[in-house]
Image: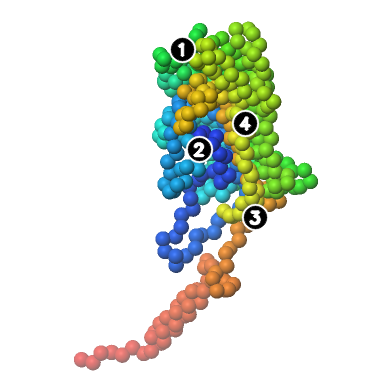
């Protein structure tokens, strides 16, 4: 199923990188009553799933930022904008795989949402809607994934060769999120060029593009329920993974991906057993065949001059950012956690050595492999089972037992109106007999 779906990709990724939100994924809010005295909402019909699960995972192939942290963040809350990270002047995101599960969503079609988006952009933090997204939602269940090619954006900031997507959203009407697979999304491309039309004042020797990915570059996002040791209940697990072979940069720089990154959030409902697991990438860097070093958790940054000391490319493995907290509300209480990471940041003309205030961190910044995971589970874990709906008590005490319904109408002699019919018929026959037995009277002349 291919349809247009509004996904402000670049703005979403910026918010996720700035600080992993620990609230539940955004869904349609539960509407309140217009009249506080109106009758309550009708109870669910039939058995309902017992499992409560909230989680989402998002993975972006590439995000291009011009003037990163160059403009302040605007907000409707007075003074709150100073506490938020600064926005980029312009952003462009390419290839997003997003999987979202929210058992507490008011609309059944928002309980599981998976999408593969081709692109998105934002200007000073404002992101318009972008069409062309591959989407699956549940309910109803989708036993088979939806796959297909995604429209390729034509932009001088980034060029894609082949972009494919796959999405699947599952939901069991009796067991809810206790189904496998639950939510999966994938985007893959076979060729990428980033910043292929830089301004003339930015000299880049040898190549016209700052970054190119000649081989397959794949992003996977997944939310599922996993077993909890020593418990019959389940944990919510959100995972973001990347797959890449090599990346080529201007100036003859080549980056071989020895080990791709994996970011996972597992929520059991208990802080002691919930955890963030991150496998940092291992990247081998060379220039014109000369080994420059290895980027890993112990060596996260390499500066490479391209033109004397005027044009510098900074390579950096973005550090892991994570948050955890207990929560209560929306039908259940438990523990939630989230994290963000990026496989590789490439900064062109970084400004950290200029020591001037209010400057962007670089002329341009390209992030390859942005990852976000969040998960929330109730105390004790996710219960996989079915229960009959509980009828809420009426105000002022327990509700009176329902009156016995009158018996249904019968179609035989037991029907309540049949005795009345035969009584009336009998009286009519008696009257006829009496009338016939009386002597006839002749009329007088």
Residue 404, percent from left and from top:
57, 72
Crowding at dot 4, Cα within 10 Å, few <14 / some 14-19 / many 20+, comes out as some
Mark 4, residue position: 319
| Quarter the C terminus occupies | bottom left
Q: Residue at x 69, y 35 (%)?
A: 277
Question: CA–CA distance between discs 1 and 2?
Answer: 30 Å
Q: Quadrant of residue 22?
A: top right
Identify whether 319 is placed above or below 405.
above
- From the viewer's side, name the closer residue of 383 and 235: 235
In the rendered image of this protein, does residue 322 appear above or below residue 31? Answer: above
- Is label 3 in contact with label 2 (beta carbons under 8 Å)? no
Residue that carries the numbered disc 1 in the rendered image? 203
Alpha carbons under labels 4 and 1: distance apart: 29 Å
Disc 3 from disc 2: Cα separation: 45 Å
Q: Could you classify mark 2 by the number of other residues whose Cα lies within 10 Å: few (under 14), some (14-19), or many (20 or more)?
A: some
Contact between marks 1 and 3 (CB within 8 A): the answer is no
**Between disc 3 and disc 2, whose residue precedes?**
2
Q: CA distance from mark 2 to mark 4?
A: 16 Å
Q: Which residue corresponds to mark 3? A: 387
Q: Residue furthest right?
A: 230
257 versus 120 height, above or below = above
At 50% from the left and 25% from the top, the residue drawn is 354
Which callout, 4 or 1, points at the residue further toward the start of the chain? 1
Q: Nearer the viewer, mark 4 or mark 3?
A: 4
Q: Is residue 228 left or right of residue 334?
A: right
Asked which secondary structure carries label 3, the reply is: strand
Left or right relative to 117: residue 267: right
Which numbered disc covers residue 85? 2
Q: CA distance from mark 4 to mark 3?
A: 44 Å
Colouring used for the render: rainbow
Q: Residues within 10 Å of mark 3 (few under 14, many from 20)?
A: few
Q: Secondary structure at mark 4?
A: strand
């Amino acid at each position: 199923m291919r349809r247009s779906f509004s996904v402000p990709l670049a703005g979403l990724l910026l918010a996720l990188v700035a600080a992993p939100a620990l609230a539940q994924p955004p869904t349609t809010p539960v509407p309140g009553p217009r009249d506080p005295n109106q009758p309550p909402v009708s109870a669910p019909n039939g058995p309902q799933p017992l499992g409560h699960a909230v989680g989402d995972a998002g993975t972006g192939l590439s995000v291009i930022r011009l003037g990163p942290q160059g403009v302040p963040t605007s907000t409707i809350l007075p003074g709150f904008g100073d506490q938020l990270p600064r926005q980029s002047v312009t952003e462009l995101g390419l290839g997003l795989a997003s999987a979202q599960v929210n058992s507490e969503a008011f609309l059944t079609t928002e309980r599981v949402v998976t999408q593969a988006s081709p692109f998105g952009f934002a200007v000073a933090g404002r992101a318009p809607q972008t069409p062309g997204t591959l989407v699956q939602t549940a309910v109803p269940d989708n036993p088979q994934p939806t796959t297909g090619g995604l429209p390729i954006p034509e932009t001088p900031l980034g060029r894609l060769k082949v972009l494919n997507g796959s999405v699947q959203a599952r939901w069991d009407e009796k067991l809810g999120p206790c189904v496998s697979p639950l939510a999966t999304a994938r985007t893959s491309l076979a060729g990428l060029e980033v910043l292929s039309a830089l301004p003339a004042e930015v000299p880049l020797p040898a190549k016209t593009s700052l970054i190119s990915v000649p081989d397959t570059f794949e992003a996977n996002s997944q939310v599922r329920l996993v077993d909890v040791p020593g418990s019959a209940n389940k944990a919510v697990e959100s995972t973001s993974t990347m797959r890449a072979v090599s990346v080529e940069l201007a100036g003859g720089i080549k980056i071989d991906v020895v080990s791709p990154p994996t970011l996972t959030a597992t929520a059991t409902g208990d802080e002691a057993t919930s955890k963030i697991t991150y496998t940092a990438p291992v990247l081998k860097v060379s220039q014109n065949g000369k080994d420059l070093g290895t980027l890993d958790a112990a060596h996260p940054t390499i500066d490479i001059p391209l033109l004397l000391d005027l044009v510098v490319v900074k390579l950096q493995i973005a550090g892991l950012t994570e948050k955890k907290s207990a929560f209560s509300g929306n039908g259940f209480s438990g523990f939630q956690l989230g994290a963000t990471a990026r496989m590789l940041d490439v900064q062109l003309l970084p400004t950290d050595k200029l020591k001037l205030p209010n400057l962007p961190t670089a002329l341009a910044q390209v992030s390859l492999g942005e990852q976000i995971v969040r998960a929330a589970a109730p105390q004790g874990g996710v219960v996989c089972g079915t229960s009959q709906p509980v009828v809420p008590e009426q105000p002022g005490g327990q509700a009176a037992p329902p009156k016995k319904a009158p018996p249904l109408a019968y179609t035989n002699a037991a029907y309540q109106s049949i005795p009345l019919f035969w009584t009336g018929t009998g009286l009519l026959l008696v009257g006829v007999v009496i009338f016939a037995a009386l002597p006839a009277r002749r009329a007088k002349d």
